[in-house]
Structures are given as C-alpha cells and as structure tokens.
Amino acid sequence: MKIIECRDLTKEYVSKTQSQQALAHVSFSVEAGEYIAVVGKSGSGKSTLLNMIGLIDVPTSGELLIGEQNTKDLSENRRADLRNQKIGYVFQAFYLEPAYSAYKNVEMPLLIGGVDKKERKERVMKALEIVGLAHKAKQRADTLSGGEKQRVCIARALVGEPEFILADEPCGNLDSENSKEIMDLFERLNGEGKTILLVTHNEEDAKRAKRRIRMLDGGIVADETL
Ligand SMILES: Nc1ncnc2c1ncn2[C@@H]1O[C@H](COP(=O)(O)OP(=O)(O)OP(=O)(O)O)[C@@H](O)[C@H]1O
Ligand SMILES: [Mg+2]
C-alpha cells in the first residue's frame, strides 16, 4: 500500500539577493513497511524533502500525496490535522519542552489531538515502554541524557500511532553508543511494521535501512534496494 507519493516536487527559496533550488523535480513513493535512508552531502536537500513530506513546509510546485490525500490546496488546519494524525517527526535537536517531564512531553500530541486522560495515560506509558524509558516518566526532560532525550522524542513521535516516522539526523547530537541504541530501536520498530524515513550522514547507519535514496543538488541521484 502506497502511503507517500511525491510527484515532481520542487522547492525554491527566494530572497532579495538570491534564489536557491533546494528540491529539483523529486518523484518517488513509499510503501507501508519500508525503511528508507536518505543520504547525500550537506545542502543536497534532505531536510527540505523531509519538511515537505512532514507537511512542515510547502513545495513550490509538484504534488504530495499522503495516503489517498493530495495535500495541495489543503488549509493550514487540515495540514496540521493530517500531520498530527499520520506523521511522527524526530529531529536532531530534540525540541523537547525542557521543564516538562518525559511523560508530559510525550503526552503533548495527544493533548492537542483531544484524547481523554485515561487513554492518554495508557498510550504515553506504552510509548515510553517501547523506548525503554517508562521508569523515567517523571523525570524533567532537561535532566535526561542525550540518548534518553532522543528516545523520549521517538516515544512522542510514536504516541499518536502515526502511519510513518520521519527522522532527520536523529543521531546527529549523540555519541556512537547512544546512536547505536537509537538505530537498534528504529530497526526494531520497522521489524514491527513501522514505516521509517531516516535522514543520515552516517553511511553505516544508512546500510541498516532496506532502501537508500541518495540526493545531490536537490534531486535524487540513486534509489537502491539494500
Ligand atoms: N529557509 C531557507 N531559505 C533559503 N535557503 C534554504 C532554506 N532552507 C534550506 N535552504 C537551502 O536549500 C538547500 C538544501 O538545504 P537542506 O537543509 O535541505 O540540506 P540538507 O541536505 O538537509 O543538508 P544538511 O546535511 O547540512 O542538513 C541548501 O542550499 C540550503 O542552503
Ligand atoms: Mg539537513
């Protein structure tokens, strides 16, 4: 089942002094259950592509389908709903609320989604268990280690039971041991059927995915099954 389809996507950033084509005619699709690594040198358009698919930014031209839904011409509210229902996003820089507990951070998307308290509790604790942090539920986010912070972010991405997970350099701020734990976790999640798109600079990490998309100058230059 096709869950993401990019049709001839472009993204141009225009300022007074220059314009930059960050995405150049990108077309590809993602089936449920895939594990894709997006690689390519700095500035090649990896984050731009993820931000389009994550409905964080809008393409200049082309079409993006999430499931059956063509995202062109959707209102900002509908885009936000779709993002909240279908997409789990994990960033290099975590973006946790520092003074909130791990629990409260993971609960946030469910609060926004209007889920009732009892169900929230079940789902938050389940998500924290999946990432091995149920015992740290009450700890403030800013006192967690880097690896723990990223696992809280993954729990937060999972808690809404998204259709797919987008991860942009999730190990970029982690040492090799913590990176390995995060990569093990992604592999396990994919083994359980989760669809994952992972941007990484690390070629070894990329090899653990099932498919590798290589970008250069905003375009896809290789798309290989591993
Ligand atoms: N908001 C923006 N305004 C102007 N140019 C931008 C903007 N965002 C990205 N770009 C440009 O678009 C190109 C692609 O950027 P992008 O962040 O997608 O690269 P990347 O592959 O993720 O790089 P990195 O590996 O360094 O994270 C770059 O040349 C960048 O300077
Ligand atoms: Mg990037």
Image (tube, grey):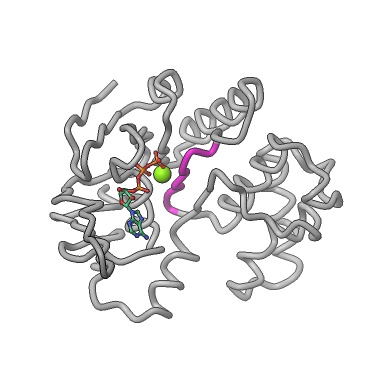
Residue 169 within the segment the image draws in magenta: yes
Q: Nearer the viewer, residue 62 or 174?
A: 174
Note whether 48 is above or below 174 in the view shown. Answer: below
Query: Where is residue 119 drawn, in percent x and y?
Result: 70, 64
In the displayed structure image, the side of residue 179 where residue 122 appears, left or right: right
Residue 208 within the segment the image draws in magenta: no
Query: Where is residue 222 drawn, in percent x and y?
Result: 19, 30
Q: Which stretch did the figure color magenta?
A: 163-170
Query: Where is residue 51 drawn, in percent x and y?
Result: 38, 56
In this view, the residue farthest toward the front is 17
In the displayed structure image, the side of residue 142 where residue 212 appears, left or right: left
Q: Nearer the viewer, residue 130 or 14?
A: 14
Query: Where is residue 205 drawn, in percent x and y?
Result: 45, 23
Residue in the image at 16% along x and 48% along y: 27
Note whether 138 is above or below 111 in the view shown. Answer: above
Residue in the image at 25% along x and 52% along y: 22
User: Image quadrant of residue 41?
Assistant: top left
In this figure, what is the number of numbered marks? 0
In the displayed structure image, the side of residue 59 where residue 62 appears, left or right: left
Residue in the image at 41% along x and 68% along y: 82
Location of the C terminus by quadrant is: top left
Q: Main secondary structure of the magenta part?
A: strand
User: Image quadrant of residue 103?
Assistant: bottom right
In the displayed structure image, the side of residue 41 where residue 89 appears, left or right: right
